Amino acid sequence: MSRPARFWLFGAGALALAAMLVLAIVDLPGFGHYPGPYGDLIEQGGESATHATDLVTAVNFDYRAYDTLGEEFILFAAVLGIAIVLRDRRGERKRAPGAPGTEGGLVRPSAALGMVGLAMVGPLVVLGIEIAVHGHLTPGGGFQGGLPLGSAVFLAFLGGEYAAMKKVAPHAAVELGEAAGAAGYALVGLGGLLFATAFFQNFIDRGEPGRLLSAGTIPLSNIAVALEVAGAFLLLWIEFSDQALLVVPDDSGDEEG
Amino acid sequence: MTALQVGALVLVAVGAPVVALVRDPLRQAFCFGVFGTALAILFFVFQAPDVALSQMVVSAVGLPVIVILALAKLREEEAEGEEE
């Protein structure tokens, strides 16, 4: 197809799409005027039912905890897929962390940048834990807290050396953390089946709303998800870093034809 | 609509085409980080702090790191290809 024809085809399509979008947006209810019943129901009865003061987390880990299990395993399966695609292949050689040439693959940070990076490790760990364990009280939760936790470990690489990070977070430990988090959340659901009546039914005393130890199983779920998310993203970054820094073509010549 | 909300909407409206139009993947990764942060601000000023937190950690930390590492690998392979 010639260039002008493509342009006109795209133009006509874009105009039609824009017209439909404008029509749809004009018909939307105004900001804050949500017409469905669920939001109002949860806003009225959510806190007294779940004893969580952050109702978004209450919805995620109580009303629809089962959906969240599915979302969690989407992340789990995606990272598993990356790990399989980036496995050690024939014709490639993985150098040992810290071997000559492995740290120079990316630009070394200046001393000041390295210091800032390393100094941020502690605060990021605290921030991650804070966001995760207060998920039922304030905005945040396992997913939002897990990523700062994972990136805190990764900063050891960005601010220092990759070999150092591999020592702090060995591959097996990261995998174990991810798996334990994913399994932990499923176990919280099974606990509902065992100690209450249904999968993901709350089976722990809900306590006083607003306290750190309240809202029953929600904080437990948040901690499990934080572990899973931290492990998943760390594993993802480690797999990509291994490829960028350690894996090189194998020139030893024992490869077949 | 408050001035903050209008500002955040404008920031996102400007940021999205910038990410799409930048040709160099490395610059694109950084632009995406900034755009993602703008999106997080948008969610925050429209009273969705939970979503804002998720958006911030994924777009400012999670994704750019992956893109940059993939680019580092590609450039290394390109450099080796030129030597041979």
Image (tube, rainbow, N blue to C red):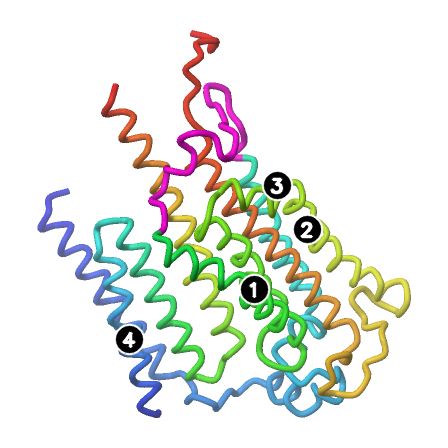
The answer to whether dots 2 and 4 both sit on one chain is no
Taking A78 as reference, is A2 left or right? left
Q: Amino acid at mark 4?
A: Leu
Q: Is residue A25 left or right of residue B17?
A: right
Q: Residues within 10 Å of mark 4 (few under 14, many from 20)?
A: some
Query: Judging from the image, what secondary structure is the residue with disc 1 in?
Result: helix
Q: Which residues are magenta?
A: A85-109
Give the chain letter at badge 3: A
> Does the CB distance between marks 2 and 4 fall below 8 Å?
no
Whole-angstrom CA distance, mark 3 to mark 1, is 21 Å
Residue under numbered circle 3 = A171
Q: CA distance from mark 3 to mark 4?
A: 40 Å
Disc 4 on helix, strand or loop?
helix
A105 or A253, which lies in front? Answer: A105
The residue pinned by badge 2 equals: A177
Which amino acid does the dot numbered 2 rest on?
A: Gly
Question: Which chain is disc 1 placed on?
Answer: A
Q: CA distance from mark 2 to mark 4?
A: 38 Å
Q: Residue at 23% across / 60% down in the picture?
A: A13
Residue B11, which numbered label? 4
Q: Nearer the viewer, mark 1 or mark 4?
A: 1
| Residue under the image location 52 percent in, 87 percent down | A35
Find the residue positioned furthest to the right. Answer: A195
Pair 2/4: label in front:
2
* Residues at discs 2 and 1 both on one chain: yes
> What amino acid is labelled 1 in the image?
Gly
Rounded to the nearest whole Å, what is the CA distance between mark 2 and mark 1?
19 Å
Q: Residue furthest left?
A: A4
Q: Are marks 1 and 4 on the same chain?
A: no
Residue under numbered circle 1: A122
Q: Position of residue A80 (x, y in %)?
A: 59, 42
What is the crowding at mark 3: few (fewer than 14 residues within 10 Å), some, or many (at least 20)?
some
